[in-house]
Image (cartoon, rainbow, N blue to C red):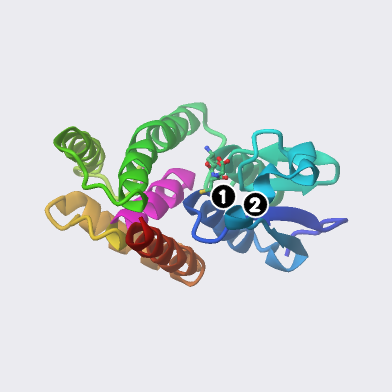
Amino acid sequence: MPNIAMTIDFYYMKGSPPCAVVSLIFAEVGIESQVNSHYVNIEANEHLKEEYLKINPQHTAPTIVDDGLVLAESRAIAKYLVAKYGNNKYYPQDINTRALIDQRLDFDIGTLYARLGDVYYSLILGSPMNENQLNKLDDAFNILNNTLEGNKYAVGSEPTLADISLAVTVLVFEAFKVNIKRYNNITRWLTLVRSSVPKFDEIVLNYVNDCAQIVSKRGKST
Ligand SMILES: N[C@@H](CCC(=O)N[C@@H](CS)C(=O)NCC(=O)O)C(=O)O
C-alpha cells in the first residue's frame, strides 16, 4: 500500500457517477483505508451550505482535500491520485498515450456523460427523452463504438483512466435501461473492463444502483 502521511478527505454524493470514478481510483491505487469519506446530502442541499461552499465554491461532488490540496472535478482528481499514489498505472507518462487518454476523458465528460446528463434530467423531471436527445446519444455511442473498433481498450492494450471513466458512464446508461447491446464493440469492451479492473463492480455497482433508484423515485414524484 502506498505510504501516505495523512488521511484524504473525500466529499461524495450517493448515486453520483463522477464520485464512483474517484472511489474506484482510491481502491485501485490501494489507499481506500486512508480515505475519510464525508457524505454530502444533495436532497438536504448540503452542497449549498456555507461550510461546503468554503471547500468547493463550485458546489459539486466529488471533492477531495489531500494535505492541504483541495481538488474538485472527478477526472482531475483521478489523474492526481493515479500520478501521486498509483505510480501512473492507468495514466502512463508517454506523451502520445496521455494525449489520447486525455482526449477520451474529455470526450466522456464533455460529450458522452453530458448527454447522459440530458437524459438523466429528463427522466427525473418525468418527461420523455425527445428525438434530438436520442439522436445525440446515439451519435455519442457510435463515436465510442468506432473508437473501440479493432482496439482492446480505449487507448492501447492495457486498461487506463480512459476505460475507467468511460465504463462508469456506460454502466450508468445501462441502469437507465438504455440498450447498449447494438453497439458491439462497447458491449465487448465493457465486459473486459469490468473483469480486468479488479474492484470495478464492487465499487461502481453501488453507485449505479443508487443512481437508478434516485431516477425512479424522482421520476415517480413529478
Ligand atoms: N464535472 C464534474 C461534475 C460533478 C457533478 O456535477 N456532480 C453532481 C453530483 S453527480 C453535483 O455535485 N451536483 C450538485 C451541483 O452541481 O450543484 C465532475 O466530474 O466532478
> Where is residue 167 drawn, in percent x and y?
37, 53
Judged from the image, the secondary structure of the residue bearing numbered disc 1 is: loop
Secondary structure type for disc 2: loop
Residue 158 is at least partly visible in this image:
no
Q: Amino acid at mark 2?
A: Gly
Can residue 183 be seen at all in this image of the molecule? yes
Q: Nearer the viewer, residue 199 or 113?
A: 113
**How many numbered marks does the figure carry?**
2
In which quadrant of the rendered view does residue 112 lie?
A: top left
Label 1, ligand 1: CB separation under 8 Å: no
Closer to us: 25 or 158: 25
Classify 193 as above or below 100: below
Q: Residue at x 34, y 58 (%)?
A: 219
For label 1, the residue is 89
- Which of the pair 191/213 is nearer the observer? 213
Q: Horizontally, is 150 left or right of 117 in the view?
A: left
Determine the residue positioned at 16% across, 50% down.
183
Tags 1 and 2 touching, CB below 8 Å: yes
Residue topped by disc 2: 86
Residue 96 in the image: x percent, y percent? 45, 27
Quarter containing the N terminus: bottom right
Give the label on residue 205, or none: none
Q: Is residue 166 magenta?
A: yes
Tell whether circle 2 marks a residue whose Cβ is less than 8 angstroms from ligand 1. Answer: no
Main SS category, magenta section: helix
**Left or right of residue 154, residue 87 in this image:** right
Going by the numbered disc 1, the residue's amino acid type is Lys
Task: Please report the bounds of the magenta region as a residue range.
Answer: 155-173
Spatial separation of the CA atoms under disc 1 and disc 2: 6 Å
Task: Give the image location of residue 146, x and y in percent.
Answer: 19, 38
